[in-house]
Amino acid sequence: MKIGLLKSLKRARYVPQPLGHYGLAKANYLHFTSPIRRYADLVAHRSLVERNQKPSRKIDMGELTTIAEHISDTERNAAEAEIEATRMKKLEFFERQLRERDPQVFRAAIVDVRNYGLVIELPDADLTGLVHVSSLSDDFYVFDATQRRFIGRRARKRYSVGDELRVFVARVDRFKRQIDFALADERLSTRPSRRERRKF
């Protein structure tokens, strides 16, 4: 849920104009940490030095705008590359789980319910996946679009947003970067997995 909130926020970007800081409620705000850590910090330090020199040199705002856009783009590219690399490692991990005879059981929470299945989030793995409706084999489940939930026709069992589940990996599609899960409760009703408590 926290990750969903963060994803809904606008991405930070570098600009030469003082736009302020929403979170700190500051009209004038300059972000810098160390000139050896970020190029943006180095540009800020250089600009401050040039302003304090005698005679002071006028700062080229056009050049600063170009640099700010370049830094914003490269930072986004680096962040996306990091996310993609992490996702690939998680896919490899779950592919290994799929090959094992006794796969690990994970705790999950339902974050959305759609007509084709339950969209779940694994908090220990920071990952979303799907429990397809066809894998809910203990009953015939009907999708309630108004309440965003599944209701079992016979036993009236319900699956709604916020419900906690125990799942294991059922299918990995490396090309689509998708992982399907199945409910562990039915599979483990007679024999609990000895690996159930181990975290990702």
Image (cartoon, grey):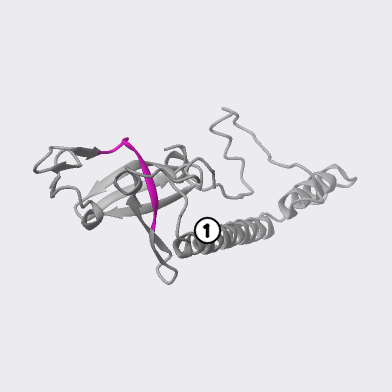
How crowded pointer 1 is (Cα within 10 Å; few <14, some 14-19, many 20+) is rated as: some
Question: Which of 171/178 is in front?
Answer: 171
- Which quadrant of the figure has residue 73? bottom right
Q: Residue furthest top?
A: 25
Query: Secondary structure under badge 1?
Result: helix
Q: Residue furthest front?
A: 190
Question: Which of 129/24 is in front?
Answer: 129
Q: Is residue 61 left or right of residue 119?
A: right
Magenta part of the chain: 160-169
Q: Residue furthest right?
A: 54
Which residue, given by chain and number where applicable, does mark 1 sit on? Answer: 90
Q: Residue furthest left?
A: 154
Q: Is residue 36 left or right of residue 1?
A: right
Which amino acid type corresponds to the residue marked 1 in the rendered image? Lys
Please say whether residue 143 is one of the residues in the magenta stretch: no
Residue 160: give x, y in percent of width and height.
Answer: 25, 38
**Which residue: 49% across, 47% down?**
126
**Which residue: 81% across, 49% down?**
35
Residue 66: give x, y in percent of width and height.
Answer: 63, 61
Locate the N terminus by quadrant: top left
Q: Is residue 45 above or below residue 134?
A: above
Residue 137: give x, y in percent of width and height.
Answer: 20, 52
**Which residue: 50% across, 40% down?**
197
Question: Which of 141/81 is in front?
Answer: 141
Q: Is residue 174 above or below residue 19?
A: below
Q: Please count the marks in the image.
A: 1
- Which quadrant of the figure has residue 161? top left
Residue 172: give x, y in percent of width and height.
Answer: 41, 64
Q: Is residue 14 above or below residue 148?
A: below
Q: Main secondary structure of the magenta part?
A: strand
